[in-house]
Amino acid sequence: MTHAPVVDVLGSKYGVGETVTVKGWVRTRRDSKAGLSFIALHDGSCFDPVQIVALNTLPNYNDVQRLTAGCSLAVVGTVKESQGQGQAVELEAVSVDIMGWVENPDTYPMAAKRHSIEYLREYAHLRPRTNVIGAVTRVRNCLSQAIHRFFHERGYFWISTPILTASDTEGAGEMFRVSTLDMLNIPKTEQGDVDYRQDFFGKETYLTVSGQLNVETYCTAMSKVYTFGPTFRAENSNTSRHLAEFWMIEPEVAFADLSDVAQLAEDMLKYVCKAVLEERADDMAFFAERINKDVIKRLESLVSSDFVRMDYTDAVSILQASSKTFEFPVEWGVDLSSEHERYLAEEHVGAPIIMQNYPKDIKAFYMRINDDNRTVAAMDILAPGIGEIIGGSQREERLDVFDRRLEEMGLSKEDYAWYRDLRRYGTVPHSGFGLGFERLVAYVTGMQNVRDVIPFPRTPGNASF
Amino acid sequence: MTHAPVVDVLGSKYGVGETVTVKGWVRTRRDSKAGLSFIALHDGSCFDPVQIVALNTLPNYNDVQRLTAGCSLAVVGTVKESQGQGQAVELEAVSVDIMGWVENPDTYPMAAKRHSIEYLREYAHLRPRTNVIGAVTRVRNCLSQAIHRFFHERGYFWISTPILTASDTEGAGEMFRVSTLDMLNIPKTEQGDVDYRQDFFGKETYLTVSGQLNVETYCTAMSKVYTFGPTFRAENSNTSRHLAEFWMIEPEVAFADLSDVAQLAEDMLKYVCKAVLEERADDMAFFAERINKDVIKRLESLVSSDFVRMDYTDAVSILQASSKTFEFPVEWGVDLSSEHERYLAEEHVGAPIIMQNYPKDIKAFYMRINDDNRTVAAMDILAPGIGEIIGGSQREERLDVFDRRLEEMGLSKEDYAWYRDLRRYGTVPHSGFGLGFERLVAYVTGMQNVRDVIPFPRTPGNASF
């Protein structure tokens, strides 16, 4: 491949007068009365297309004048200082090789006009060609690279926890069953149950809802680990914040308490947001112009602010003392709802909040009981403009306390045998958190719906493509 | 967290005489008659444990003498030049805080002795505490980080292709069905088929076998993209090379022909192997000593060799002309088997081979037909010591040729409507390849079975943990 990415041409890696080849797709074509055409050519490497100036002296200028959005070209051109505004350089075409036409431009689904975001979802295979999904794709990539880099620089190991699991133990949500049984001829046991012994794995098997319990096994051997992989919820939620298939990041840290992982979460969020501000200014400018005017300010503010730590118990007092009327009344022991979280983060504090020490009855069985015996060492990070973005906890590492908690919650020791082993053999304090990747991408880009920040969203009734 | 990772202590980040805290697990304890104990403490941060010298003047020296493999400790110690061999420094304990005992050391499954690799598989939750699985984990992480870095540095975007899919189109292997239907009460249509309209996604849905077709949609918009995610095969294969759940890397490159992606694959393999040699010398020394004595030489040779390109047709002639007797006879048109591939790479060439231009009848429908009309622009990379490690191709971008091929193979245009759209609208030449991540980790570490290079292997009859 001897062609240059558009980002390199616009970034002035080639001097005025140099000849370069670019390859990409037409975004727009505009003909001038002076006998030349301007073609905006994009190749995905950055937000802006490069402007091609095609003179009517080109042997195939007739064809050039028929170019429409989506046609693919290889252009050899000479770098010129641009006359127009918005970019420093343009290419004067030496040759324009048309690689692929658009079959019937009038019905091309991505024709050059504004499309609604809902319309684009119907064309998930073509929408990456649009400005908005192209920008989302680059920011999503930037965030994922920054996440891996952040953990790698700090000595964390990436662990791929299993997607398929026969442990139905976390209870974090409804699960999808995975099977190879013949659905028209389900084998039965003598008792009339499904005979999963005849299924592929010999047991009823599901898609994972979280890698946390599995990654704790690596944490209690390698000290600092994280997952970054897909997780699944079979919940019939048709909201802008839910997907049936989404990606999660779950660090788990040995010898760390709640405060340590709260700090880790704060550092990580700042690190990855800073990376986006530095590396994807082009796309962020577009999001600020078209999607949410506050989106850059919001990131800058997150990067420079100190996150405020607040106990759940204090938050309840603040909410009760506020003059604001809430739809759901607040009292100690209830789960805070979105209106409460946003009031606290946006109006009361005006910065991200690390909310800590929740009532144990509204949190999961594995969280560490505090000395007051009514709260657990759990934390959520609430960010202005989105609410909860991270949830974490210190894990109960004391076998006797853990066993009492299992009993309280009616869970069986046998089901958690391997998880208990981590507490039976050289147990250590450890803590971790979970970050839903799509919620982060939505937050960073200002996109309203998580369906538009993952390439092929899976929701109830939709697994197309 | 104010403690130091073992890797920093051994790497002499702290000077002799400095006091540091380390936290980890006991690998071994040895008492000296001189009234002191030597404890090897590991924390996963590197292969070697740090040696703790615990004198009998410690107030809890009686407890120290009861420590066994797997106990967890926080040790404050003074850095000393080591008297023993193998490491430059050791820690003389100022205090030894025992955080977690091992319940019944006699039955601790990871007690300090040699365990068979098959035995360790039964304890997938504890095996990361062993030398071998710890080393695998660090090398696996190093490879995954290097892969992301390689593509990121070259302007590729990571694309998360869907895990759940209603397209049963690739035919690359047996698929797992994903459903939330009640298995004891399957809804039926009037025709007596399963009524998947009542299932979660409203259609029969599977786990993906490859992200390739999906990622082509992003390739034909963003130019350079790659996937790195889990894929699934419901094949009843109980071999050392097959998993039901495994991770794949699939780059897809616009404006690239077969030769371009063959070069990309060669560059990538060299880049990631070099990263392991440079960053994980400690673990590789262990693999060379315990697993496969050639493992470092093999990597060094891969990094420094030029991969040899060879046409399938020439390979058949070479095999036919060789004096070697093969179990499976060779003639033009057959798929090469492992014995042929290994003969070519190990005996005939003695370097990795990029085998190109296979008969179209043994390859997939999407591969680009060559001008001879009997071969396709496909390539496999065959490495000495393992055989096929990468498979790729140029994709058929010509709509008329693609449609003829669909017809030839009895596939329907409707099923491939969205894939055909990529050829209808601004089609471009493009190519890509697939790399099975676990096969790469097995190759690099010398581990014989892919079940030992993924944290929780899924195979027929096994989805435990």
Image: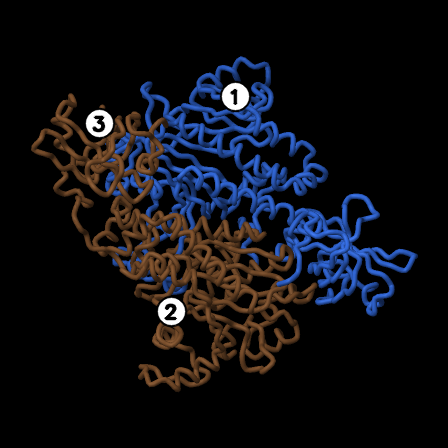
Chain colours: A brown, B blue
Quarter where residue A416 is shown: bottom right
Q: Is residue A78 left or right of residue B78?
A: left
- 10 Å crowding of disc 2: few (<14), some (14-19), many (20+): many
Q: Position of residue A424 (x, y in %)?
A: 68, 66
User: How far apart in space, not on screen, are marks 2 and 3 (Cα)?
Assistant: 50 Å
Q: Residue at x 66, y 55 (%)?
A: B5
Q: Chain of mark 2?
A: A
Neighbours of disc 1 within 10 Å: few (<14), some (14-19), many (20+): few
Element type where label 1 sits in the image: loop
Local secondary structure at mark 2: strand
Does residue A97 lie above or below A319 as drawn? Answer: above
- The one nearer the camera, A20 or B116, is A20
Of A288 and B97, nearer the camera is A288
Distance in Å between CA atoms under marks 2 and 1: 66 Å
Circles 2 and 1 in contact, beta carbons < 8 Å: no
Give the mark nearer the N terminus: 2 vs 3: 3
Residue drawn at x 39%, y 30% is B393
* Chain to which mark 1 belongs: B
Which residue, given by chain and number where applicable, does mark 3 sit on?
A93
Dot 3 amino acid type: Ala
Occupied quadrant, residue B449: top right
Q: Is residue B403 left or right of residue B229?
A: left
Q: Which residue is label 1 attached to? A: B329
